[in-house]
Image (tube, rainbow, N blue to C red):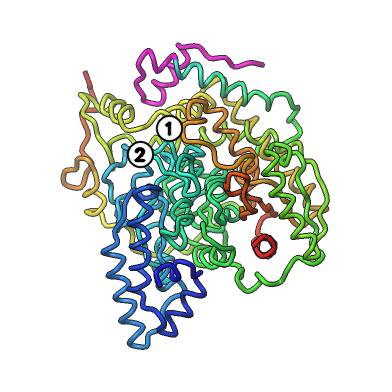
Amino acid sequence: MTYRIDQADVAHIAHLARLRLSDDEIEAYQGSLSRILEVIAVMNAEDLSGYAPMDHPLETVNLLREDRVAPGLERASVLDTAPSAEDEYFRVPRILDAP
Amino acid sequence: MNDEILDWGIAELQRRLDDRQVSTVEVLGAYEEQIAIQEPEVEAFLALDLESAKDVARQQDGRRARGEKLGRLAGVPIALKDNLCTMAFPTTAASKILEGWVPPYDATVVERLRRDDGIMLGKTNLDEFAMGSSTENSAYKITHNPHDLERVPGGSSGGSAAAVASRMALVALGSDTGGSIRQPAALTGVVGFKPTYGRVSRYGLLAFASSLDQIGPLAGTVEDAAIVAECIMGHDPRDATSLQEGSPRLVEVLGEGVQGLRVGLVTNLLATASPQVKTGVNDAIATLVKAGATVDEITLEELEFGLAAYYVVAPAEASSNLARYDGVRYGLREPGATVEEMMIATRTKGFGPEVKRRIMLGTYALSAGYYDAFYVTAQRVRTLVRAAFSRAYTSFDLLIAPTSPTTAFRIGERSDDPVEMYRSDVCTIPSNLSGDPAISVPARTDDDGLPIGVQLLGPALSEPLLFRAASVIEEGLR
């Protein structure tokens, strides 16, 4: 199974990742991503159906901590590092009814 | 005097400080002088604040004079990889998207080093968001290998490795997602340790691939690495993946040797190495045998699928983790008429080419129609790799392999070919996939005087054994 991707694929995934690429960049990424996908494709040479997918190195789940109030980050110190803030909020350009 | 100060490990430094043979201010002075000489050529640091470091030194001398008992890292000059959050320094992950950002909190590891009176000198260079094996992907500067300034220090913790190797810091912290502590340690001739996943809190580490990332020390000696590791390991309620176990005792077992220990040489990882690196590994094996260990060969072909699985899992997790850099809460914001336009403009300008490549690779691997073929298959390979290690550890206590197939390569040599660059990590990636600990120890140099690294791998929570064997190799090859 090969996974050669074309320039339309690159443009599509760039859009999904919220990145804008020039035509030259699309061409360059098409080449490098295709080569990387060839390396990745070696996995498919093996029958792995007997191996369950592993999400994580740890097998422990749902460890509960004591439900106790503890100090967190100060709101002001967090908003201070934001590019734009107003009152208690992060300020962003228009979202609803955007042109 | 200054040169002598730079030769001291942590224990020696502490003894001299306790005996008042030297003051903390004098120690900082020696490091300041070394930085003035080395940093213009090596360029390991993205931020340095020696004035604050000297203030802390003065305070420590005062506390000592008043008879106060100081922490076990008192007077130790430390460098931090710039993907660890620090309130005292800007934290950039070597990315333009975080230029100038000063975090409102310290990473747990930084807090713990400070609690033990470690002295932070500054933040070190890395591949942007730790994505790379040469530190050439930094958006700010190229770091040079102190053993040959035309060569890379490895990566992604290349700044931390170069700072320790050039004696600008006594120890440093790095992070290891696919070998990013061990490979630069090998290429610069220092010790680099990746703990078992969950041993060290990731709170305050700018996330790359959360199921693989671990923080660990880089140091000039196995003992110094052990001391720093003890300080930073142990449960942290702020990291949900932090193990409940306390920090294991490493320093006190260093002298226990390897008599009767069964070590497996991973032949197919050795086969990836250059002839001179092979010689280094064989020299290390000879020291273990001489100290009473038995070394036999084992082939773990399954590990060869690790590279492929890694370049699915790590970019997939990265594409999700780096979605947070959207211009809303911190870092860069580029103007845009709508929130989506703003996010696209910000991410397009803020991320460098390799980060974009990995985000897109991960986005592709997780996208509709490809999820099973890529992501689920890669997760099955993780189980396969873990099964291979389990099989090995029924016959062996530890495994030995090269850390990197080659010694340090030239700046620019691999930067145009991502696949060639990715292959630098073939021997280190399996431990990240399985979550097991591993340590790289210097094993002599090649004909050009470039350091060779040998890697010891162990099952989960086998750190004391790893450090005992590392200590034997260090002693044997000194």
Residue B15 sits above or below residue A52 on the image: below
- What secondary structure is found at the residue carrying circle 2? loop
Q: Position of residue B373 (x, y in %)?
A: 62, 24
From the image, tell me which residue sits under label 2.
Answer: B95
Look at the image and tell me whether residue B456 can be seen. Answer: yes
Quadrant (top left, top right, bottom left, bottom right) of the N terminus of chain B = bottom left
Q: Is residue B136 left or right of residue A50?
A: left
- Rendered location of residue B400, percent (x, y): 72, 51
Q: Residue at x 39, y 50 (%)?
A: B124
Q: Residue at x 35, y 37 (%)?
A: B139
For mark 1, what is the residue? B355
Amino acid type at mark 1: Val
Residue B88 at x, y percent in the picture = 29, 58
Q: Which mark is residue B45?
A: none
Task: Specify the segment rendered in magenta.
Answer: A1-27
Whichever of labels 1 and 2 marks the residue nearer the N terminus, that label is 2
Give the SS element for disc 1.
Answer: helix
Q: Residue at x 40, y 49 (%)?
A: B44
- Chain of the residue on which disc 1 is drawn: B
Query: Is residue A6 a member of the stretch shown in magenta?
Result: yes
Whether residue B115 is visible to the viewer of this picture, yes or no, is no
Pinpoint residue B172: horizontal percent, then vertical percent: 46, 58
A54 left or right of B264? left
